[in-house]
Amino acid sequence: MSDLPTPRISDLARAQGPDALAGLNPEQRQAVEATEGPVLVLAGAGTGKTRVLTTRLAHILTSGKARPWELLAVTFTNKAAREMRHRITDMIGPSAEGLRWLGTFHSVAAQILRRHAELVGLKSSYTIIDNDDQERLIKQLLAAENIDPKRWTPKHLAGLIDHWKNRGWTPDSLPPAEGAHFANNRGAALYSLYQERLRILNACDFGDLLLHNLTIFTKHEDVLADYHRRFKYVLVDEYQDTNVAQYLWLRLLAQGRRNICCVGDDDQSIYGWRGAEVDNILRFERDFPGAQVIRLERNYRSTEHILAAASGLITANRDRLGKTLWTEATGGERVQVRGVWDGEAESRLVAEEIERWRKSRRYSEVAILVRASFQMRAFEERFVLLQIPYTVVGGPRFFERAEIRDAHAYLRLVQSQDDDLAFERIVNTPRRGIGDATVQKLLTVARTSGVSAMVAARDLVVSDELPARARTALSTFLRDLDRWRAQADALAHPRLTETILEESGYIDALRLDKGPTSQTRLENLKELVQSMGAFDTLEAYLEHVSLVADLDRGAGDDAVQIMTLHAAKGLEFPLVFLPGWEEGVFPSQRSMDEHGERGLEEERRLAYVGLTRAREEARISFAANRQVYGRWTSQLPSRFVDELPHASVEAASETGYYGGGPGLKQTGSTWDETHYGSGYDSPGWKRAQSRGYAGGPPGRTQVIEGEGRLVAISDPARPSAYARGDRVFHQKFGYGQVTVVEGNKLTVAFETAGEKKVIDSFIQPA
């Protein structure tokens, strides 16, 4: 089995030491010692999960139940596997080197496949291709099948194949409806051709590692039986994040001895968008009858109020096994909820609070967790202005993102045709048939002639130096640039940017791209366009961008951390800001539209994850207004704000916009009723009334004493200044005529939007 000497049990026991179990709380100890049979450890945030995992493995070894190579322990990341191995080594010494089967799902599956590659038509020397190689291979297949790669992109098919493999579907088992998603029902055939091509190349992609394992285990019972004998105990980390293929793989391996321990938290399942199935953990007891379920609920990270807020919020989810975090450290700051006028006010508020924090603490103790990357821009610009050091975790800064740099390159080229760096960046972005050879020829001609690349291009398109296809594509590109340059004086620069991105095909290319980041990139471009409205001219905006880039130097070790909520999982900070808690932003409208109630529940789990990153203070904010394509739209506070338990929340007002809370004096004005539904007796309006959050034009505010609940500010009895027949204007719906007046509630027949019910504070005389 192993080249390593078999460790003596007495040596392992001495290595672990007598206090390894003594320091555990009762639930942790139960999870460590329950070695026989199926066990599900529901480990809440900050409850010492990693300690339980490593101590359990060490306990199995020191008690003589198994030798190191008889344990299978799988994690999701190499970092987690390294940390687990390091901790076990500290506990039991060099014997931990015998843990051959401790690693990620894919690394363990790759080991198994090496041993049995011939059973799936491969050699043991197979190679694993990366994403670039995968897309190149698919591009070749599309060309051979005469499929337009612009309409049906290699990246799209690569994403579908990855999804199918995550579901455990081979070409033979792929449901017919799935294959219909690509190239007019040719997806299944292309998948089969792709797999055959991989076999010929003696290669596989990452999805194949588990998929081939499933094929081997299901078609060769003797091989599976050998692994049943080999693995006496199976341990799984982050079980809530498993996809279908990982779930099936684990079930097959655990069928023999049934000594499987899965550690996870259904309330932290936030990766459904990449294939994770929360149902895997929810049905554990059905999959393994008689399983023990042990809940780790004592939190060692956060304050009492933060835990109460997070626990109260997550109870609104129906699909969960249920647990409530608690701590012996009572007290602490309540979760603050702030309402502000707009996104810029939100960034000012956060920056001011960070500066106050920095008087006695470090920047690195602060994190800003956003739902979507486009929210980062306002904070980044504010921090650069105030010279607050910051780091974007898990991705580039806003102005460093590829799509933002591409948009800026177009604008720079419109402003100055001598900008060769901008020309080179976007001459074939998106792809328009101007290849690398053509670009290199252009640049060579420009250098030798002492002219700009644009001038060289104009000379080349009227010569026979370039192939006809490249010459035509380049001519079209130059005409587009000339048209946009002519429009620059007539169009506002945000509108000009929209025009360029649409007419260049850049937006269409992102829409056709079915990759996981395409929608995020579109949202970033929307944020870019709306942010440009703060500058009088295109020149002023581009100068601002250059200054930001110049000031935006390395932050060093002491810097505020900015990241998405997804990137924050597993991290913790003394002070956490959670901005943008507005309907449509968080919870994400796209997630709810695409996945309904399941999408909403995953969004709520994401909010739970965000709150439980905070150790000492958590601060939530929402804006009453957001600017979209230069137009202001009213925003509703997130429904998640409603779901926070009032006793653990402190609401405060900024510029007349507030969150409710016990005994608070609250200020604000009424919301447009159309956000909530039609009529004061409608469910939507009743839900709005329970909120007590307000937004509207400054100066129209009311003051209401809190009564230990969220208070609605709506007064249908107040007479309106408008009468039936009045012509009015609404910022969202345009011009219309009042048809019904009920107190301050109006029914207006709008010229383009039709009949809407609105509150009179949101309209003005036309």
Image (tube, rainbow, N blue to C red):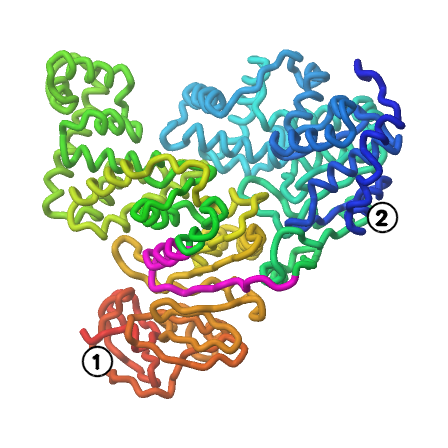
Above or below, comparing residue 123 to residue 26 in the picture: above
Q: Residue at x 72, y 43 (%)?
A: 263
The number of numbered discs placed on residues in the rendered structure image is 2
Above or below, comparing residue 605 to residue 746 in the picture: above
Q: Residues within 10 Å of mark 1 (few under 14, many from 20)?
A: few
Q: Residue at x 47, y 34 (%)?
A: 182
Q: Residue at x 65, y 38 (%)?
A: 244
Residue bounds of the magenta highlight: 330-353
246 and 328: which is toward the camera: 328
234 sits left or right of 197 in the view: right
- Say which mark, if any, is on residue 290: 2
Label 1 sits on a secondary structure element that is loop
**Residue 712, percent across and down?**
45, 77
Image quadrant where one finds the N terminus: top right
Question: Mark 1 — residue?
Answer: 726
**Residue 518, percent across and down?**
41, 39
Mark 1 and mark 2: Cα distance apart in space: 71 Å
